[in-house]
Each structure stands twice: as C-alpha cells, then as structure tokens.
Amino acid sequence: MENQAFLRVGLFSMCFFLLVFVEFRSPLVRHREMWTINRLTNLLFLLSTVGMSRLLISMSAVSAAIFAQSNQFGFFNVFPVHAGVSFFITLILLDFLIYLQHRAMHAVPFLWRFHQIHHADERLDITTGFRFHPGEIFFSMIYKWLIVCLMGPSIAAVVVFEIILNSFSLFTHSNSKLPSRCQAALETIFITPQIHWIHHSIRLFESQKNFGFCLCLWDRLFKTYTHYPLVEVTRLKFGVADMNARQNNFKDMLLHPFRNMHGLNYLLGRREGD
C-alpha cells in the first residue's frame, strides 16, 4: 500500500468533482450564489486539515495499522481470522465506532466546542464536508489511532475505510437531490444527504438524530434515526442556535472554541434556545 496516499487523493478528487456536477444539475435546494465567504471558510478548513494530517502523519489510522501489523499488536494479530472476514468486520466495527465518536462530539461540552464549528454552516453543500476544526481533527486522529491499534486490522481495510469515510463526508453534506427510487433504496442501508441534513437542523431534537456517517444501521438500532419527506428537508434551517455564525470567517471560527471556556453548557444552552 505504498501508493495509498495517491489513491486516496485521486478517489477523493473524483468524488468531489462528481458531486459538484450533481449539485449543479440536481440540487436539493437552489441557491442564487454558489460561492460565498462561507464556502471560502470551508475550503480553508480543508487546507488546515490537510496540513495537520501531514504534520501528524504518524498519528493517522493507516500509520496505526502499519504499527499494529509490524508489531503483531491488536486483536486480529493475536487472534487471526480469515482475511476476508477480518476485512468485513473492520469496516463494520469502524463505522460503529465513528458513530459513537459523533455522539460523543455532541454529548461532551468540551468536544462540542470544536464540533459546533461544523454545525455552524447555515447553508449545506459539498464544502461542508471539509468544515472541521483542527481541534476536532486532532481528537479524531488520536481516537482512530487507538482503536485501530487495538483492533490490529489489515492496512488495506483501514485504507478502504478512510476512503469511504472521506467520500461519505462529501456525499452526505452535499446539496444533491437523488432520484426518488434511488433515495428510497439507499436510505434503507446508507446515510444520504436527505437523511443527514436533518442532523444539521438548528433545532435540538433534530440535531440529535442521524449521527451515522455511512450506514444508518446504528441510528436505527439506537433509536436516533429519523426520516423526513424531501419537501420538509428543504425547509430546514441550519446552524447553531447559541452561536453567531454571521461573522463566518476562518479566523473567527478557528478561535471560537477557545472563547468563554468556563461558561459552556451545550445541552442546557441548546434547550433554552430551541
């Protein structure tokens, strides 16, 4: 997997441009302007993510898989199973653990400080999938490094998972309207834009639904799944109730998690503002 970085970048780029085309031809919501300061902010967050990933490359999930394989560490190295079985289990288990991570980002006030930057986007499109604070990326890298080391999966499985993770981050946030039959079929198994947009609602009840990033299995299992007709989804208002995202520039968003750190109570605050 020496060329895994080039593979991931190539597939990520293909996915991005494909979704840009879909957004242009078949958007969920039609906007008058395509490029605003909000989109620029999201692109700058992408650059910060790339920079952090390169700086902390030894903390990546793929690096953790290489470490585990080299040192015969982790469950699948101590208790080896068929390669195909371990590959499948790795993808399903990592999907579940990312679901749990996402729920923690909402439930733990300190983590919400960083994750709310993602939710502050008041107009969703493909670039919202870039909009993650470097602090959240850092915590996510540590989390994935630890769980991959404990699992000891194959390098190939982790690379495939990372490709799926990045691709679905673009897809589920994109302003893409799927054909009704395709939407109905996909949402029985996967998270789609029409499903994930509900999670970005400014209303507390809706923002506590649809935490999954790829499979909707965990939301259905833990009763956090909900579905709206397309017409209701297009009427949703996005953002964070107790956060002024009007000054939506990169510097303000970057510094926002570190302001008034003594006074944040996310769940209480959101209920008051709902």
Image (cartoon, rainbow, N blue to C red):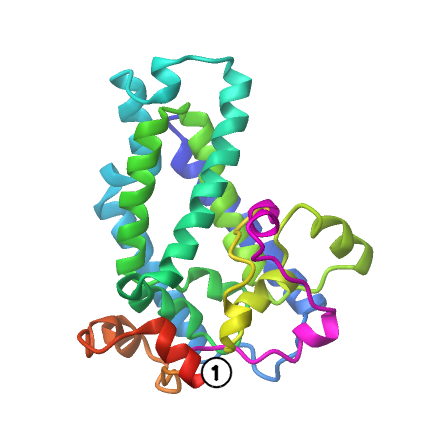
At horizontal 51% and vertical 13% (from top left) the residue drawn is 82
Can you say which quadrant of the picture contains the N terminus?
top left
Q: Do we see residue 268 in this rendering? A: yes
Give the image location of residue 199, x and y in percent. Answer: 54, 66
Answer whether residue 231 is magenta in the image. Answer: yes
Going by the numbered disc 1, the residue's amino acid type is Asp
**Above-or-below relation of 92 to 45:** above
- The stretch drawn in magenta includes residue 193: no
Can residue 241 be seen in the rendering of this structure? Answer: no
Would you say the magenta stretch is mainly helix, strand or loop?
Answer: loop
The residue indicated by pointer 1 is: 274
In the image, is residue 22 above or below residue 203?
Answer: above
Q: Residue furthest right?
A: 181
Instruction: Name the residue rendered at 64%, 66% in the picture.
Output: 23
Where does the image place residue 85, in percent across and percent down from the top left?
Answer: 54, 20
Q: What is the secondary structure assignment of the residue under circle 1?
A: loop
Residue at 80% over, 60% down? 180
Looking at the image, which residue is at 49% across and 78% down?
122
Up-down: is 40 above or below 159?
below
Q: How many marks?
A: 1
Segment tinted magenta in the rendering: 216-240
Residue 248 at x, y = what percent? 37, 81
Q: Nearer the viewer, residue 22 or 71?
A: 71
In the displayed structure, does residue 32 sit left or right of residue 270?
Answer: right
Q: Residues within 10 Å of mark 1 (few under 14, many from 20)?
A: few
Q: Dividing the picture into quarters, in which one does residue 255 lie?
A: bottom left
Q: Is residue 182 above or below residue 119?
A: above
Q: Position of residue 84 (x, y in %)?
A: 55, 19
| Left or right placement of residue 249 versus residue 90 in this view | left
